[in-house]
């Protein structure tokens, strides 16, 4: 009986000593969470930085478009044909304006020019 107690005592001391050399899973998990948090913060910072650059470029581009002469704002032929096709289908000018993202005046001008060039439709 004494030998069993001595063996169990030695085994318990050995296991106790081994427990100090095992890695703490909670600390490993905390480090992983901290690393993940840092990565998320870095990504967030980079996205904000890129968004700021894009906004500045957009504002600069908008200023450039505003400075263009009026003739450069003329819609291309594909858009004009689209407007005319919608008009020929019987859509109202307001609906054509919404679908083509053009102002009502621009839509009216496209239709008027087309009618003037063909002597009225």
Image: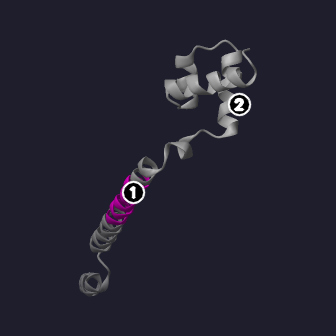
Residue shown at 67% from the left, 12% from the top: 90
Relative to 76, is 18 above or below?
Answer: below
Relative to 4, is 50 above or below?
Answer: above
Report, in whole angstroms, how far the alpha carbon at label 1 lies from the one at label 2: 30 Å
Q: Is residue 92 magenta?
A: no
In terms of secondary structure, where does tag 1 sit? helix
Question: Quadrant location of the C terminus?
Answer: top right
Name the side, left or right, on which 67 lies relative to 21. Answer: right
Q: Earlier in the sequence, mark 1 or mark 2?
A: 1
The location of residue 74, given as percent across then percent down, is: 58, 40
Q: Is residue 55 magenta?
A: yes
For the stretch drawn in magenta, the main secondary structure is helix
In terms of secondary structure, where does tag 2 sit? helix
Relative to 57, is 87 above or below?
Answer: above
Do residues under tags 1 and 2 come within 8 Å of each other at their CB atoms?
no
Near-viewer residue (56 or 121): 121
Circle 2 Cα neighbour tier, 10 Å, few/some/many (<14 / 14–19 / ≥20)? some
The location of residue 69, given as percent across then percent down, is: 49, 47
Residue shown at 58% from the left, 13% from the top: 92
Question: Quadrant location of the N terminus?
Answer: bottom left
Q: Which quadrant holds residue 64?
A: bottom left
Instruction: Read off the residue under disc 1.
Output: 60
Instruction: Read off the residue under disc 2.
Output: 81
Name the side, left or right, on which 67 lies relative to 42. Answer: right
Disc number for residue 102: none
- Range of the magenta residues? 45-61
Name the side, left or right, on which 93 lies relative to 59. Answer: right
Relative to 81, is 64 above or below?
Answer: below
Q: How many marks?
A: 2
The location of residue 53, given as percent across then percent down, is: 37, 62
Name the side, left or right, on which 3 lies relative to 102. Answer: left
The location of residue 58, given as percent across then percent down, is: 41, 54
């Amino acid at each position: 009986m004494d030998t069993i107690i001595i063996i169990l005592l030695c085994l318990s001391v050995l296991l106790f000593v081994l427990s100090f050399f095992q890695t703490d899973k909670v600390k490993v998990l905390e480090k992983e969470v901290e690393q993940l948090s840092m990565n998320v913060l870095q990504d967030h910072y980079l996205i904000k930085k890129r968004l700021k650059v894009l906004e500045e470029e957009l504002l600069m581009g908008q200023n450039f478009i505003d400075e263009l002469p009026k003739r450069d704002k003329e819609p291309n032929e594909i858009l004009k044909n689209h407007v005319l096709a919608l008009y020929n289908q019987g859509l109202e000018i307001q609906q054509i304006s919404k679908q083509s993202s053009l102002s009502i005046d621009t839509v009216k001008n496209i239709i008027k020019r087309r009618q003037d060039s063909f002597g009225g439709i």
